[in-house]
Amino acid sequence: MQETQHWQDEIITVNDHLKLHSVNESFSGALFELVMRNKSALQKAMDWPQYVRSEEDTRKTIQGNYLLHHRGYAKMFLILEQEELIGVLSFNQIEPANKTAYVGYWLDEAWQGKGLLSQALQAFIARYADSGQVRRFVIKCRVANEASNRVALRNGFRLEGTLKEAEYLNGQFHDQNIYARIIDKRR
């Protein structure tokens, strides 16, 4: 593909030890290992981990996310702590006309509870709000996912409502909270 030759990796520096690096194939092995290490916990919150069975599965997913990232339909960043891959922070979907992006995230269990996800999320939001690409940031999470609900509230998101039986996970429908944070640099 001709256009991919000109694409550059994006790096968002959070602080002197934490950064976000846009997804690319060089992370396939490390991301596969991270998913495998956290698979049982991830499957409690998301559907996709059950389909990850090999590094090749991860590589193919990364290839698709790379294209979406650079074409502006989604953004997938890997969270690196001292160059160690510890999680993922993404816009799972971007609505350019509405300047709205849907935030997704997960962190290695060993790194949870240290404030790293919140630090990364704040830098991520600042980058896209400052650029004017996104003004409405949305987090949707199961009502029962207490940790994800706390992340949203701790980072300035406001609960806008609850969608009834909006998420199908592990054979059941679950209610989903929808949070938003609006940052309008024109005001």
Image (cartoon, grey):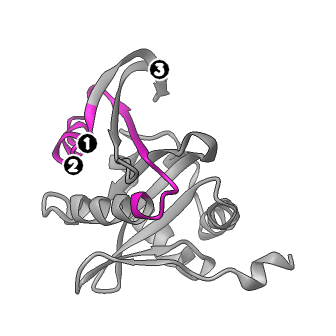
Q: Residues within 10 Å of mark 2 (few under 14, many from 20)?
A: some
Label 3 is placed on what type of residue?
Ala
Look at the numbered discs 2 and 1 and tell me whether their residues touch, using CB distance below 8 Å.
Answer: yes
Label 2 is placed on what type of residue?
Asn
Report the magenta residues as a range: 129-158
Numbered label attached to residue 17: none
| SS label for mark 3 | strand
Q: Is residue 27 left or right of residue 175?
A: right
Q: Is residue 46 left or right of residue 141?
A: right
Numbered label attached to residue 152: 1
Q: Position of residue 40 (x, y in %)?
A: 36, 48
Where residue 176 sits, quadrant-wise, is: top left
Residue at 53% over, 48% down: 92
Q: Nearer the viewer, residue 144 or 183?
A: 183
Identify the residue under disc 2: 155
Q: Residues within 10 Å of mark 3 (few under 14, many from 20)?
A: some
Label 1 is placed on what type of residue?
Ala
Numbered label attached to residue 166: 3
